[in-house]
Image (spheres, grey):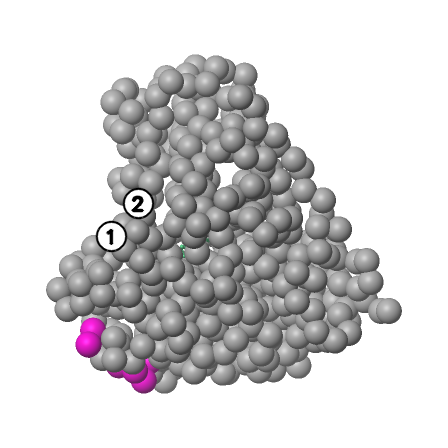
Amino acid sequence: GGICAVAAVDLGATSGRVMIGRVGDGVLELEQVARFPNGPVQRADGWHWDVEALWGHVREGLAEARRREPSIESVGIDSWAVDYGLLGPDGLLAEPFHYRDERTARGVDAVHAVVPFEELYRRNGLQFLPFNTLYQYAADPRVVDAEASLLIPDLLAARLTGRRVAERTNASTTGLLDVRTGEWDLALAEALGIPSSVLPPLVDPGETIGVAGSGAPGLPVVAVGSHDTASAIVAVPLSTPHAAYISCGTWGLVGLELSAPIVTDAARAANFTNEGGVDSRVRFLHNVTGLWLLSETVRAWSEHDGVPVDLPDLLAEAATVSTPARLFDADDPSLAAPGDMPARIAALLGMPEPRAEARAAFARVIVESIADAFARAVRTAGDLAGREVDVIHLVGGGALNALLCQATADRSGLPVLAGPVEATALGNVLVQARALGCFGGDASLDDLRQRVADAFPPRRFAPRP
Ligand code: LFR
């Protein structure tokens, strides 16, 4: 058969990229066309995303992708979750906030005063994260003036196509979807003072959102798992029915794929979430603070030194020091906001900030602390779901970090199968390709994952005693 080509836009919290995906018989390939930095930008009223810059990069990336591969048939967009842009008649009412902006704390109190967390959890099935969209709305007076609120991938899709929709996997992270029906919980929205008119019609991965005008003229925009984690889980080459996954980038999303949500008291107490997956699967997982701890630490040291500190070099050196005796809780809320990361970690460890010669040992403590939190979350997921987990698949940028993969195997006592690194972009590509009919007939998630396993055999880390 022939080869299908699609374009995937994948925006992460620290970088974004545009890729060409090629899919056919025995073929699954990515070609990176553009890669650009992303991150929080500080404005007078707090941390924001520079969505205009992102939009510029996306447009240029798509144009370049089509120059290189004129047969591209569609485009799919994914990004981090929860953040939104409010739209009025002339476009954005304001620059979108970054979920790490502290204003959300006010929203938490306001929401819980109306609907206690226990009840929220029963309704939306989400772990408590202070930046879940419903808390952000409660801290954002402009939501009542908006015509619509669109999550980041939907915002870009609307710029391309003119259509305002809410892709369902990402919508599940707002806190306003009913965990049982997957539909907007309009009664909850009303109780919280969020006009139902701002909540756009829901679409599922695989549906065509519309055809792009300027930006990518004539190209259909296909909904994918527009929550980056939903796309990543599509491309986890799950090797056993009892496999756990860790999607490790800025965050480490640790959990299981289920066919029905778990909203028990125990799941709530363990702060496990039931996010919506592609093909109506449930992403039962816990957010562990992931590579953010390393990237923010390296950023602080680079600023301090006035020259960039190289992360791969640092990790290579960290691998040579002995396993630290003391760890910190990677989930500690004090580590969420940008800035000052080495100082905050040192405070948790009850020690002074490391001098230059102790940086590798400090990086080792960070890696081991992340691995420890990963291992605990895998255990908890298995306990809550009544599954004997037998292997961990670690995908995303973290799969490049051999020290982290080995430490996760050692601390969990389970084999870690690392890769693919570009799981999110692959999941995006595969869902588009399936929608285009490139697989001739219907392909199940198992079929898609088999293609990933064939094209990107994972690297195995066996647990050491
Ligand atoms: C990962 C991710 C997580 C979400 C966090 C904030 O990139 O999408 O799944 O909890 O970012 O949106």
Give yes or no for contact between labels 2 and 1 (Cβ–Cβ under 8 Å).
yes
Residue type for callout 1: Glu
Element type at mark 1: loop
Is residue 244 positioned above or below 55 on the image?
A: above
Residue 247 x %, y %: 52, 48
Answer with left or right where residue 134 lies relative to residue 363: left
Query: Ligand 1 within 8 A of label 2's CB?
Result: no
Answer with left or right where residue 91 lies relative to residue 447: left
Gap in angstroms between the C-alphas marked 2 and 1: 8 Å
- Seen at 59% across and 59% down, the residue is 234
Residue that label 2 marks:
337
- Seen at 46% across and 72% down, the residue is 168
Report the residue that reaches farthest toward the right.
Answer: 1
Residue 449 x %, y %: 66, 57
Residue that label 1 marks:
102
Q: Which of 27 and 5 is in front in this view?
A: 27
